Image (cartoon, rainbow, N blue to C red):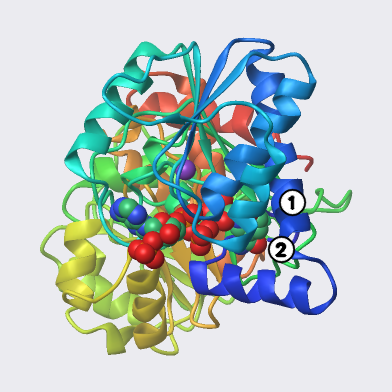
Amino acid sequence: MTGDRPILTTAQMIAAEQEAIDAGTAVETLMERAGAALAEAAYLYAGKMPILILVGPGNNGGDGYVAARHLAKHGVPVRIAALGEPKSDAAKWARDQWEGDVETLSEETKSAPLLIDALFGTGLKRGLEDIVVLILSRLATEAHVRVACDLPSGVQSDSGVELSPVPDFDLTVTFGALKPCHRLFPASHKCGRVVLADIGVDATSAWAEIGQPRLAPLKPDAHKYSRGLVHALAGTMPGAIALAAKAAARSGAGYVRVSTSRSIDGLPSAIVQTDTAEINDQRIGCLLVGPGMGNLPQVLTMALTSHVPKVIDADGITHLGDPERLRGQNAIVTPHEGEFQRLFGRLEGSKADRALEAARRSGAVVVYKGPDTVVAADDGRLGFALPAPAWLASAGTGDVLAGMIAAMRARALDGFEAACAAVWLHGRAAEIAGPSMIADDLIAAIPKALSLVDA
Ligand SMILES: NC(=O)C1=CN([C@@H]2O[C@H](COP(=O)(O)OP(=O)(O)OC[C@H]3O[C@@H](n4cnc5c(N)ncnc54)[C@H](OP(=O)(O)O)[C@@H]3O)[C@@H](O)[C@H]2O)[C@@H](O)CC1
Ligand SMILES: [K+]
């Protein structure tokens, strides 16, 4: 995922900031860059709309004072309402640079068409006081455009949990790196568009937002096996494996084969049906087991005897029982919340922490699905999906994703990269298919999603 936008926890961000300071960049310089970027993004988004900036006592508030100065310089009418005096040295410095008035934030504070929330950022320790929540909510409702500085106030940066109620924002301008909350539910769906500004800190991380995949172009001498053979194992409900197989075929697998004891209606003729297992065929790029498997644990057991890479989804996950069974399997598992808890138990920490722990315990790539899908590998890599369209929550979309992952794996991406590529394409296909889509429409949209990628 080289080139994808990095994601840092608060502790990592503080360390990166300290590194920049140790290398000679003053914290005021970093704040100046952050505030200028916030001002620029707000201006580009909303033009000369009159602005109200809410500032808190820490450096998030400091960014707000800097942004106010830059916006005023460009002729934008700006007011500031402060929740107390600045406490940190850098915020005091930023306050001193602001030559305009500072109102006290209160129930009487008048709204403005553009609201910038610079109350709290990564330093939030507890939920906002009830009265502040009420004022923020009113000012956000009355504004036409809402912009958050670094992250919406009330959100816990590392987990995406709302420590107090948070309004919806149109734009969030963040600095140096994205934070987990920009991509973890529920905060992920409150941030609006997330703009990342470079402020000159080194934000190298094994965690990143899942961006557009880079797929190797097809070789001129490609043949069906070199493009990847996906071999799917059917169970008691053939509709689900049919969806997954079709999705694999549409995602560019060269050859898709389904082992099934009875003929599956409606499968395109290009997808080969066979009544034998054939799982030890060395040409298989990825085995796919679980969609529609039903109560046939022997299908899973058979899949686990094969040494080829595999995607284990749905009933396959339910029947695993013990994550240790995944060790050495070169597997990708795709649990939603319920399946995750059945397989891994109730793990501690944020969704990011839980996904990584699951990957470490099992040695598998874990695609932990939901409105905030994350992909974890046991080497510590973690990919965070863009917020999924709500209409992806419908029957069969998980089967489609499993098929797409299998196709990406069969075309020789490593397990983590394959899962990230498929998650990204799945999200874009859903956007293309639109709100009234069913899983079949999602499959039909895969070629358009793939055409967004240079391959
Ligand atoms: N990292 C970087 O490279 C850069 C980061 N930058 C910016 O700095 C931001 C982080 O700044 P920060 O650490 O000062 O934290 P911030 O979010 O302003 O709040 C801390 C203050 O709030 C207080 N407080 C906490 N919770 C509270 C509550 N519920 N209700 C009331 N008070 C509460 C807390 O007080 P305490 O509880 O500690 O007494 C403390 O005074 C970051 O988000 C980014 O915008 C840029 O400037 C450039 C470089
Ligand atoms: K904020």
Q: Is residue 148 above or below residue 409?
A: above
Q: Nearer the viewer, residue 368 or 247?
A: 368
Residue pictured at 69% horizontal, 12% vertical: 47
Query: Within 10 angstroms of label 1, few (less than 14), some, or many (20 or more) residues?
Result: few
Query: Within 10 angstroms of label 2, few (less than 14), some, or many (20 or more) residues?
Result: some
Instruction: Please state if 316 lies on the left or on the right of 304 as rendered.
Output: left
Amino acid type for the residue under numbered disc 2: Val
Q: Position of residue 353 (x, y in %)?
A: 37, 73
Q: Position of residue 79 (x, y in %)?
A: 55, 22
Q: Is residue 371 above or below residue 347?
A: above
Residue pictured at 32% horizontal, 72% vertical: 354
Residue pictured at 38% horizontal, 35% vertical: 190
Residue pictured at 37% horizontal, 70% vertical: 355
Distance between mark 1 and mark 2 Cα atoms: 36 Å
Which residue was labeled with disc 2? 27
Q: Position of residue 26 (x, y in %)?
A: 78, 65
Q: Quadrant of residue 340?
A: bottom left
Q: Nearer the viewer, residue 26 or 153?
A: 26
Is there any visible trace of residue 403 in the rendered image?
A: yes
Q: Nearer the viewer, residue 262 or 240?
A: 240
Residue at disc 1, secondary structure = loop
Instruction: Please state if 428 lies on the left or on the right of 348 as rendered.
Output: right
Ligand 1 lies under 8 Å from the Cβ of mark 2: yes
Which residue was labeled with disc 1? 214
Residue at disc 2, secondary structure = helix
The image quadrant where one finds the N terminus is bottom right
